[in-house]
Amino acid sequence: MLGAGVCGLAAGMMVGRDGHEVIILERDDAPVPETPEAAWENWTRDGVIQFRQGHYLLPAGRAILEAELPDVTAALAAAGAVQFDSLRMMPPTITDRAPRPGDERFVTLTARRPVLEQVFGRAAQAEPRLEVRRGVSVKGLTSRTYNGTPHVAGVRIDSGEELNADLVVDAMGRRSQLPQWLKEAGSGAVHEEAEDSGFIYYTRFFRSLNGGLPELYAPILSAVGSYSLLTLPSDNETWSVSVYISTGDQPLKRLRDPDRWTSLIAACPLHAHWLEGEPITGVLAMSGVLDRYRRAVVDGRPAATGVAMFADAWACTNPSQGRGITFGLWHAQHLRDVVRAHLHEPRAFAEAWDAVTEAELTPWYRETLLEDRGRIQEMNALRNGLEPPQPDAAVAALLAAMMHDADLFRAFLESRAGITTLGETLARPGLVERALELASDVTPIPGPDRQQLLQLLE
């Protein structure tokens, strides 16, 4: 397995616990810190561009961890991860606060990315069938032909050594070079779609002054005109606040300055109280985030066998919805199952891996991509004084009606929790009709308009 991020480690543990010997190769050489706080203060992970950005594990990810790696869940809790109930975001316009069967689906356990990875890293070190080799760079693949198809037989590392494997799993994340390595090994081309998501993030972390976390008076992800706010509870009485903007919005790039960044958050009535903590970082910027999708089966034929593109190395999106690790954990479950059924049948494995990925995960990628495109189009229209594009009528009705109906709110929240795609939700009998019946004008989330925003940032 190539890559010892959270998803690679989770997959390694699941496959190892199923009886297989697993070696994980990680380019970054820094060892796993002894404590979560040491991970936050000192750990450098150059291979993970979002390592110091806001992080949130979706409730669906928490459910997978509890089912598959309960000891890791317990270790996360012991490390100070915060339990958060997404139903706390239910707006005050909903008067029906009675619990429903299944409400536990909306609860998660979340932590800052360095803390999360430290917990996974320490857990992986205790696995008897799992070996993590850090400071090892992979330089390419070794291959042979299997039934007329290029077959990956292992990898070549920086020392010149060749390591053989029944299966090579690409868990190298957003920066994976696997398609180039496959080309060099003589395989067919991998199908790839890629585009810049068009967003820049400006994030700052805080620690509580009173032992509590800020109340939620608005959604975790709030669209406010030509910018969005992302407020994420985290471990050990910490939290993050992110502003994200369109890459082309030059005036808003002044948000890199801490004083200007603070002025914007302070001017947002439902978010200003998130500043009431001790800043523990400056303003951390991230740009160049790709939306990218890869598929190794083209026209019904695998580009190569003996290899699996996994998690962010398979597909990655704008991280504001926090779906990456959750869907990586879900992908890990499927990897364990397909390995169990087809490890020694290379063609059958490639076809089964492609089929389950396309059926279970690709719809989430497509839906996320469409939402990102819609939001960036809206941002760009508003900053240029144009009328933004109109959203899909069914989606608009649900977004309006859910502010007044507890069950419709839960239906929408399923998509934000990683439980059900929005498309599946809208296909439920009678749901759109109910939303259209209850829909009314949506009160926008308050914050500076475009002119006020530009004045704040002068």
Image (cartoon, rainbow, N blue to C red):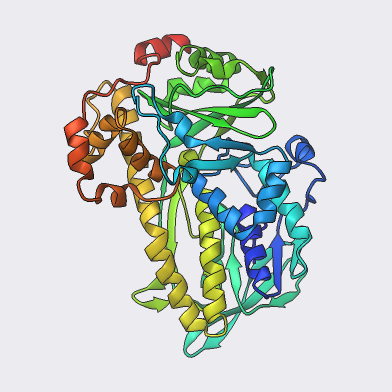
Q: Residue furthest bottom?
A: 147
Q: Position of residue 28 (x, y in %)?
A: 72, 53
Judge from the rendering whether residue 87 lies leftward or rightward of residue 30; answer left or right. Answer: left
Q: Position of residue 169 (x, y in %)?
A: 59, 68
Q: Please give the name of the residue rendered at 64% of the width and 67% of the height, measured from the top-left corner.
A: 1
Judge from the rendering whether residue 345 lies leftward or rightward of residue 403; answer left or right. Answer: right
Task: Judge whether residue 221 can be spotted in this image.
Answer: no
Check the image and report above or below for 439 versus 111.
Answer: above
Q: Please give the name of the residue rendered at 60% of the width and 40% of the height, measured from the top-left corner.
A: 110
Quadrant in the rendering for residue 79: top right
Quadrant in the rendering for residue 447: top left
Check the image and report above or below for 388 versus 449.
Answer: below
Front-most of 281 and 210? 210
Check the image and report above or below for 318 versus 167.
Answer: above
> In this figure, what is the number of numbered marks?
0
Q: Position of residue 10 (x, y in %)?
A: 63, 59
Task: Judge whether residue 197 can be spotted in this image.
Answer: yes
Judge from the rendering whether residue 449 lies leftward or rightward of residue 185; answer left or right. Answer: left
Q: Please give the name of the residue rendered at 21% of the width and 33% of the height, measured from the top-left corner.
A: 390
Q: Residue furthest right?
A: 34
Q: Please give the name of the residue rendered at 45% of the width and 17% of the height, measured from the top-left corner.
A: 270
Q: Position of residue 50 (x, y in %)?
A: 59, 42
Front-most of 333 and 367? 333
